[in-house]
Amino acid sequence: MNDRILYVRLPCNPIFPIGVVYLADHVHKLFPDVSQRILDLGTIPPLDFGAALDRCIDEFKPTLLVFSWRDIQIYAPVGGRGGNPLQNAFEFYYARNPFTKLRGAIGGLRMVSSYLTELWRNQNLIQRGLKRARQYCPEARSVVGGGAVSVFYEQLGKVLPKGTIISVGEGEALLEKLLHGQDIADERCYIVGETQPRDRLIHEQPAPLEKTACNYDYIAEIWSDFDYYLQEGDFYIGVQTKRGCPHNCCYCVYTVVEGKQVRINPADEVVKEMRQLYDRGVRNFWFTDAQFIPARRFMNDAIELLQKILDAGMTDIHWAAYIRADNLTPELCDLMVKTGMNYFEIGITSGSQELVRKMRMGYNLRTVLQNCRDLKAAGFNDLVSINYSFNVIDETFDTIRQTIAYHREMERIFGADKVEPAIFFIGLQPHTHLEEYAFKNNILKRGYNPLAIYFPWVAKKLLWNPEPLGSFFGEVCLQAWQQNPNDFGREVMNILEQRLGVAPLEEALTAPIDSKEPKEPKELTAV
Ligand code: B12
Ligand code: SF4
């Protein structure tokens, strides 16, 4: 067999390229004779991207180029590569002072230009790589996948070279078929210029896969820059413990990208994988699951894994993850602390039970509070980031007051300095319930281009902050940046409290129809 696969992780911030590592590992286990190499452009200075790609292709002469594209939405409303996109956008849309508005416009233009440059640069790298590989092997092909492609697969088909295979979600099964020379028509993919993406392609379930420990000795052989992530010691190296999320949160696309069926990677295999990294000096791990504990029925799996990490003697590690804090027990809290969890993010989105239900999030906020108390009692004394997205749906001054009450209670539990309110506004994503809601309510027209954020009117709709409260939030955020730009989240909370007051906690925890077991709420009835 003469297949030679080059994995190119397209430029992005240096986050461990776990996707291509897993793909290469999977292929090696099934096709040990296939030669492989990894090139991570995340570790290479921008001026050298093209030359590094050329050099690698000239040396390796790949027959298959696997391009992995991690993120496109750098404009997501947190500090991104183009500056602070939320601040730019809000200054432009809501500032009354013309100078502030102008500053927002200039910042926005800078951001849009860096966004377009990245889009164009990645398309160019894909074209350039394929052209160069064809100098050595005229039949060379390219496949493109990864997080960004999974979200924007429909739009990317319009800009990538004819014949490129565009893949949605996990790539293991697709690569297997390509190497076996089998028909790929049933896979979650399509070929530019030859086939069209099937309707609802992203909603198709991924192929079942029993994940085994990644073989890092092999990865070190095929990836010369692996050490880059080991030397610094402060990277959180990705380890996946499961795939899939059963929930339905109205703005979230993870649940369709990874599928609703949760597939657990066997705990022994996860520990074996961590052990190899540990032996290479890694002490910080990020469990890259959509949710580390997606539902109560997966708590035992989390307990088993954490216990096995302890049993393996890895007692000086730290780890972080997205945690649904409604799925904790005192035993689990204890293990989380003992195994070194030193950061977690909870995306409750709102502190109002009524809104949490309307957004189909299936959280019981009272349970979350109780579990946080258990976590604190177990000795957790590190940082918690609570993600709030205001104004998603049916926000009122009352629900804002409830969110403040909820947040203050979190501060009482963990300590105000330990609770970081991360203020987001939802960046609307394709294939979500919220997008469907926007269509039904004539906020967006079907066929809009979600990548066209260079048009201010598209960007304004995708950065979800609708009236009647949109301008109010705009004003509050601008005041917060002016008063305390280095502690934006806390400042927003303080201003909201000064302006609106705070509700009794009990009001925040009580929704008109209190469903203990999250069923399918009907509030997004337009969907
Ligand atoms: C965990 C995670 C994080 C963690 C990463 C921690 C770490 N150390 O690894 C943190 C919290 C840091 C993070 C941050 C961000 N993230 Co994030 N993150 C994720 C998440 C949940 C999982 C990613 C992951 O590692 N999965 C596990 C690995 C194994 O999967 P994978 O890399 O996707 O690879 C698989 C497939 O994609 C596929 N595949 C990959 N490449 C290829 C190539 C080919 C050819 C094929 C066929 C298949 C294929 O096969 C792989 C194996 O199955 C995803 C959402 C999701 N559920 O996928 C978002 C996601 C990747 N993040 C996203 C974004 C935008 C970001 C941020 C840029 C947000 C921001 N604006 O700040 C930041 C980046 C921060 C920075 N420093 O630049 C987006 C990217 C797409 C987009 N919208 O542009 C995603 C998809 C979420 C979303 N829906 O919007 N993230
Ligand atoms: S629980 Fe998290 S990953 Fe799952 S659907 Fe909701 S927001 Fe998405």
Image (tube, rainbow, N blue to C red):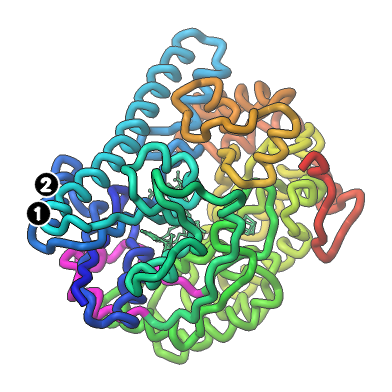
Is 55 displayed left or right of 527 in the figure?
Answer: left
Tell me the residue that label 2 is attached to: 51
Residue 146 falls within the magenta-colored stretch? no
Q: How far apart are marks 2 and 1 (CA)?
A: 6 Å
**Residue placed most toward the observer, 346 or 191:** 191
Outermost residue, right side: 512
Q: Which residue is drawn at 21% across and 59% down?
A: 39
Residue 230 falls within the magenta-colored stretch? yes
Outermost residue, bottom side: 311
Q: Which structural element holds mark 2?
A: helix
Which mark, by number, is residue 55?
1
**Residue placed most toward the observer, 167 or 512:** 167
Which stretch did the figure color magenta? 214-241
Q: Residue at x 42, y 83 (%)?
A: 212
Mark 1 lies within 8 Å of ligand 1 (Cβ measured)? no
Identify which amino acid the numbered label 2 is placed on.
Answer: Ala
Q: In which quarter of the image is the N terminus?
A: bottom left
Task: Find residue 404 and report its horizontal and vertical position in percent.
Answer: 71, 42
Q: In which quarter of the image is the C terminus?
A: top right
Q: Which residue is drawn at 64% across and 83% down?
A: 300
Task: Find residue 119 and report its horizontal and vertical position in percent.
Answer: 34, 37
Q: Which image quadrant is residue 120 in?
A: top left
Q: Which structural element holds mark 1?
A: helix
Task: Find residue 31 and report its horizontal and vertical position in percent.
Answer: 29, 80
Image region (quadrant) for ligand 2: bottom right
Q: Residues within 10 Å of mark 1 (few under 14, many from 20)?
A: few
**Residue placed most toward the observer, 187 or 326:** 187
Identify which amino acid the numbered label 1 is placed on.
Answer: Arg
Considering only vertical position in the picture, is 159 above or below 185? above
Q: Residue at x 50, y 85 (%)?
A: 267
Cβ–Cβ below 8 Å for labels 2 and 1? yes
Is 56 displayed left or right of 250 in the figure?
Answer: left
